[in-house]
Structures are given as structure tokens and as C-alpha cells.
């Protein structure tokens, strides 16, 4: 196949998944070119050795004050805001080059700004999308739920407070309604939408009114080898330093373990909110938990940590799939994870890890079991490596995505012939 890849990703799980797909497809002889934006993190997604060319087109998404005023007028008329218009223009320029390039299929990936990418609207060849997750800001409850009403009457607001908020609320809600409309149109523009778990497929159905196709990821054991190093008394966390990854919950959980055996928490993230990291440091001092945040560490250092830690504590909120538990398992590291989201499809309770409710007390007990019961820890470690080798291999993951792309091309040809 001659494959055009489009993405607008920064560092993180989505980029790691795309790197895996590009590497595997290229190794099977497929020709690949990549289109991305100047806002994406092309350095993190280092695929130059596997692709013919990477096209980086300019995209400017910062909003000025005059854009904000214009966006309010457009919101009242239910028209797309400035950032959507810029993305539409960017995708149109990418599509002009892709459509003229003689490609067999477009393999689109997520967008850091809108999740469901706009590129599908402009592409005339068969097109498949690998979607990490729907736009959680628009479709999922959260502490900053956009659809939530203004504070109730007992919130001690004055009348002037309501007057000042009235129009801002209308603009905000109408902009969100336009974003939902545009994202649903984007979803309908693809011939096939691939997702990373059955949990994600359910979210896709709830958000966009249609299901996708589960295309599980896998682990490249050459990147996450098992070294059989002695385990040290510290616990790892993996994920960006943002609230939904819940490193605060990990700290609160470890604080409930007796001080005599309380492990250090080493949290590795690829990006983060500095203010939030400072809050985490304050919380760890208050609760007497040794907390060591590490941001964007080299890959060999990550592998070293995964091979010497005693446990991975995985606290992410409704994680769509979660590569981290499988990467830890490949290195023989047992996982204690919250039993929600896609993690329930990769972590088998009491086999390659322990699943718990989102309660600090339960997490603390589970981590303490792994730390103090060497027989349990050894069994979880052996099973973890076995499970990755049997079910979650890199080769099987590439089989799935390659088959999906070929199927996308075949379906498009059938439609054209009929």
C-alpha cells in the first residue's frame, strides 16, 4: 500500500501508538508519507527512518482579542469559530497534496485541538481514522463540565454577577454546540474509524451516534525488554502531569501505607502543568510521601525504572486503553490499577496485576500486598510477561491495523464498482 498518514499530535500515548503503526507498516514494505502541523510534536514522533517524507505545514492556533470578539458574533449565528476555520484551511491544504499524491489510503490520527480531525472532509481516497478518544471536554462529565448551569441562587451571587455572565454563557454554550455539530460531521466523513478498546468503542457510540472497530495496540518488546534486575522499594506512576491522570490520588494512597515500608513515588510524565506539579509537591510534603516527578526522560531511563520499580500504580481517570500497564508488564512490573476504562481489557485481576476501586484505602492495601508478598509479586511478574508475549505483541497489533487499512481500500472499491 501507499499510505498517507495525517496527525496533529503532541507527545504521549497517541504518538507512541502512531509510531508503532508507522514502524510496523513500513517494515512490511508499505510506502508511507506523513502530513502534520507546525503545532504538533514531530521531534517526539521520530519516524524519519520509516517514511519517505514528513510534510510539516504551518498552523497558527493562538487567539487574539479581536478573534475573541469575532468568535462571539459567529457563535450567535451558530458559525464555526476562528480555530475551527484555521483548522479547516490547514486540512484543506494537506488534502490538496494528499489527493494529488496517488495514495491508496489515508490513515488519519487524532488532533490535539479537536480530537476528531477535520481532514476526512477533504480527502477523496479511501480514509480510515485511528481515534484515541472522543472529545472528552464536549461529551464527558468533568470538574469543568461546559453544559453545567450557572451557580444556584444560594451561591451568594449579586444580580450584577448574573448580568455579566449571561452573554458570556450564551457565547460559550453556542460555541460548544457548533463544535459538537462539526465533530459529528467529521466522524461521518471517514470510511472506517478504528479505536483502541471496546470501552473506547462504547464512548464513540455515545458521542457520535455510531460505532467503530476495535483495533488493539501491542507492545514492542525490543523497546520494553525484561532485564531481571533486582526490584527496589519504589512505586512508579506514568502519565502527563494533569488532573485526569490523578497523581494526587497516588500520593494519597501511598500516605496510607505505614511509614516503615512506605515507598517513594517516581512519577514519569511527557508533559505537565507546572502549577499542578507544585501542588503535588506540597501535597506529598504534607502527607509525608517522597514524591519524585520526572518529565520527558530518555527512553533508556524509563526502561531502567520499569525494570527496577516494585509496582506501577495506575490512577488515570477513564483511560481509553492505557499503554503504560502493558509496557510495565513487558518489563515484568506488576500493576495496581483502577478498574475502569480500557484498563479492564488489559489487566486481569490477580493475574498480571491487581484491580481496585477508585479508593485510596483499596489502592494502599493492594500496593502493600505487592511490596510485602514476594510470592504474589513474582507470580504477577511472570504472568505479566507471559500475557504480553501471548496476546499483546507488536506483530499482532500491526496485523490488525494492516488488515483494517486493506479492508478500507476494498470497501471503497466495492462502492465505486457498484
Image (cartoon, rainbow, N blue to C red):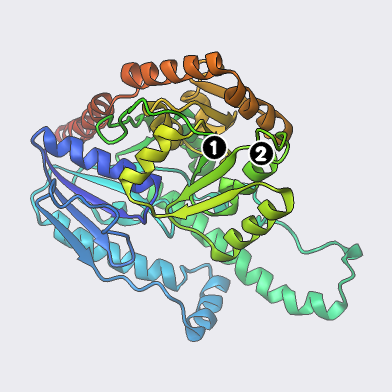
Query: Quarter of the image containing the N terminus?
Result: top left
Q: Nearer the viewer, residue 18 or 178?
A: 18
Give the residue at x 51% y 61%: 178
Q: Which mark is residue 254?
A: 2
Residue 115 horizontal/vertical position (percent) = 43, 52
Expressed as whole percent of the image width and height from the top left, the position of residue 289 reads 66, 46
Quarter holding residue 28:
top left
Residue visible at 60% across and 52% down in the picture: 243
In the rendered view, tell whether residue 253 sits above or below residue 398.
below
Front in this rendered view, residue 409 or 36: 36
* Label pair 1/2, CB-CB below 8 angstroms: yes
The C terminus lies in quadrant = top left
The answer to whether residue 323 is visible is no
Q: Is residue 337 above or below residue 160?
A: above
Return the residue nearer the eye: 358 or 291: 291
Q: Position of residue 231 (x, y in %)?
A: 46, 29
Q: Is residue 177 left or right of residue 224?
A: right
Q: Sort mark 2 into few (<14), some (14-19) or many (20+) by Cα contacts within 10 Å.
A: many
Whether residue 107 is visible here, answered yes or no, is yes
Point out the tag, 1 or 2, that comes first from the N-terminus: 1
Query: Farthest residue toward the bottom?
Result: 66
**Left or right: residue 162 compared with residue 306:** right
Q: CA distance from mark 1 to mark 2?
A: 9 Å
Crowd class of label 1 (few under 14; some 14 to 19; many from 20; radius 10 Å): many
Task: Write down the residue under mark 1.
Answer: 235
Amino acid at each position: 500500500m501507499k499510505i498517507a498518514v495525517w496527525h496533529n499530535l503532541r507527545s504521549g500515548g497517541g504518538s507512541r501508538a502512531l509510531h508503532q503503526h508507522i514502524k510496523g507498516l513500513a517494515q512490511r514494505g508499505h510506502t508511507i508519507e506523513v502530513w502534520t502541523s507546525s503545532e504538533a510534536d514531530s521531534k517526539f514522533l521520530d519516524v524519519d527512518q520509516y517514511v519517505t517524507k514528513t510534510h510539516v505545514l504551518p498552523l497558527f492556533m493562538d487567539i487574539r482579542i479581536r478573534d475573541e470578539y469575532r468568535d462571539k458574533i459567529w457563535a450567535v449565528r451558530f458559525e464555526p469559530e476562528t480555530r475551527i476555520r484555521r483548522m479547516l484551511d490547514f486540512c484543506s491544504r494537506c488534502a490538496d497534496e494528499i489527493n494529488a499524491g496517488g495514495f491508496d489510503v489515508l490513515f488519519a490520527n487524532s488532533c490535539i485541538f479537536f480530537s476528531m480531525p477535520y481532514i476526512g472532509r477533504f480527502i477523496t481516497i479511501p480514509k480510515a481514522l485511528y481515534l484515541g478518544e472522543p472529545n472528552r471536554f464536549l461529551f464527558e462529565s468533568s470538574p469543568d463540565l461546559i453544559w453545567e448551569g450557572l451557580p444556584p441562587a444560594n451561591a451568594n451571587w449579586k444580580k450584577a454577577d448574573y448580568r455579566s455572565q449571561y452573554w458570556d454563557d450564551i457565547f460559550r454554550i453556542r460555541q460548544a454546540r457548533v463544535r459538537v455539530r462539526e465533530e459529528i460531521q467529521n466522524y461521518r466523513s471517514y470510511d472506517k474509524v478504528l479505536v483502541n478498546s471496546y470501552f473506547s468503542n462504547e464512548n464513540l457510540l455515545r458521542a457520535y451516534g455510531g460505532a467503530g472497530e476495535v483495533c488493539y495496540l501491542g507492545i514492542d518488546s525490543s523497546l520494553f525488554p525484561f532485564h531481571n534486575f533486582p526490584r527496589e522499594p519504589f512505586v512508579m506512576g506514568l502519565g502527563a502531569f494533569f488532573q485526569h491522570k490523578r497523581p494526587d490520588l497516588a500520593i494519597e494512597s501511598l500516605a496510607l501505607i505505614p511509614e516503615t515500608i512506605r515507598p517513594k513515588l517516581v512519577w514519569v510524565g511527557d508533559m505537565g502543568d507546572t502549577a499542578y506539579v507544585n501542588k503535588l509537591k506540597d501535597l506529598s510534603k504534607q502527607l509525608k510521601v517522597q514524591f519524585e516527578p520526572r518529565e520527558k526522560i530518555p527512553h533508556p531511563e524509563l526502561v531502567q525504572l520499569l525494570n527496577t520499580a516494585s509496582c506501577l500504580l495506575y490512577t488515570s481517570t477513564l483511560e481509553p486503553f492505557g499503554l503504560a500497564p502493558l509496557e510495565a508488564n513487558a518489563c515484568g512490573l506488576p500493576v495496581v490499577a483502577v478498574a475502569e476504562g480500557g484498563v479492564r481489557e488489559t489487566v486481569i485481576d490477580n493475574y498480571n496485576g491487581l484491580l481496585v476501586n477508585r479508593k485510596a484505602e483499596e489502592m494502599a492495601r493492594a500496593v502493600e500486598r505487592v511490596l510485602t508478598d514476594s510470592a504474589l509479586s513474582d507470580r504477577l511478574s511472570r504472568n505479566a510477561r507471559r500475557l504480553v508475549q501471548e496476546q499483546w505483541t507488536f506483530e499482532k497489533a500491526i496485523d490488525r491495523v494492516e488488515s483494517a487499512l486493506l479492508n478500507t481500500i476494498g470497501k471503497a472499491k466495492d462502492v465505486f464498482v457498484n
